Image: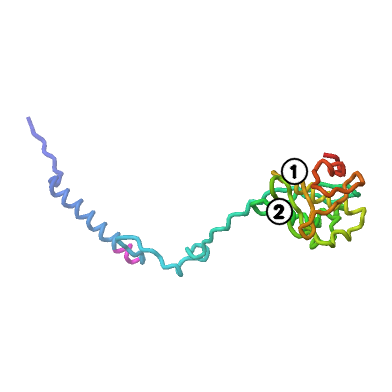
Amino acid sequence: MTTWRTSGHRAPLRARSRSIGGALAVALLVATATAGGCGVPLESSPNQLPEDALPEGLRPSDSTVPDAPSEQEPIDVWYVGDDRLVSTRHRIDPPTTPQKTLDELLSGPTEAEQNRALRTAIPDAAAVVEVSVARGVATVTLTPAFSEIPAADQVLAVGQIVLTLTDQRGIGRVRFVVDDASIAVPVPSGETSGDSVSRDEFIELADPPA
């Protein structure tokens, strides 16, 4: 039987491995040289950029923490509308105190409230000096100028103060003094009272009645 031999010659396996490994090494050297030629720096660890190299708005010094908004507290103050007492909501900085509440009343109606035809029967805020509270009774110190308020408005002015203060927790009655002496004030019945007065005596002037 005739034995046929192929004329082709295959390289040994070990020789082929050396050839492939050499090709990979050459490719890696070419890639490294190319990256260096493109100007891409190779660093072993990250570096922090100086602040002046950062765009505006991204710098640490540009960051600000906004102040927390003040939580104001609501109070009711009473003004005059069509010769009636009208309650309106105001807001003041905490804590709410009788003096802050009285000061807010004496500041007068806002522009929006004036556009609703609201006014105050206390033309001069300086006529009301201060307020103190003891055992549920608020004592309001007045100046003699308070007596110069026209008679028709005096009862409304007293009512504004009484209803505004007795809206506050812990105040049930209000007395009025001039030079530490109690004075008589007009009440809606047409009489005067030299004692402390209550909310019930003035609520009939409220519109709408509360």
Please give the name of the residue rendered at 7% of the width and 29% of the height, measured from the top-left corner. Answer: 1
Q: Nearer the viewer, residue 95 or 179?
A: 179
How many neighbours does mark 2 have within 10 angstroms: few (below 14), some (14-19), or many (20 or more)?
A: few
Residue 189 counted in the magenta span: no
Q: Locate residue 24: give its quadrant.
A: bottom left
Q: Locate residue 123: give its quadrant.
A: bottom right
| Residue 28 x/y as whole percent | 26, 57
Q: Classify residue 93 as left or right of residue 142.
A: left
Please give the name of the residue rendered at 74% of the width and 50% of the height, measured from the top-left corner. Answer: 138
| Residue 166 x/y as whole percent | 75, 45
Magenta range is 33-37
Please give the name of the residue rendered at 69% of the width and 53% of the height, measured from the top-left corner. Answer: 92
The numbered mark, 1 or 2, whose residue comes first in the sequence reads: 2
How many neighbours does mark 1 have within 10 angstroms: few (below 14), some (14-19), or many (20 or more)?
A: many
Which amino acid, mark 2? Ser
Q: Residue furthest front?
A: 181
Q: Classify residue 122 as left or right of residue 3.
A: right
Which amino acid, mark 1? Gly
Q: Nearer the viewer, residue 152 or 62?
A: 152
Q: Is residue 1 above or below residue 18?
A: above
Circle 2 residue: 132
Give the structural element (helix, strand or loop) at label 2: strand
Circle 1 residue: 172
Q: Nearer the viewer, residue 187 or 111?
A: 187
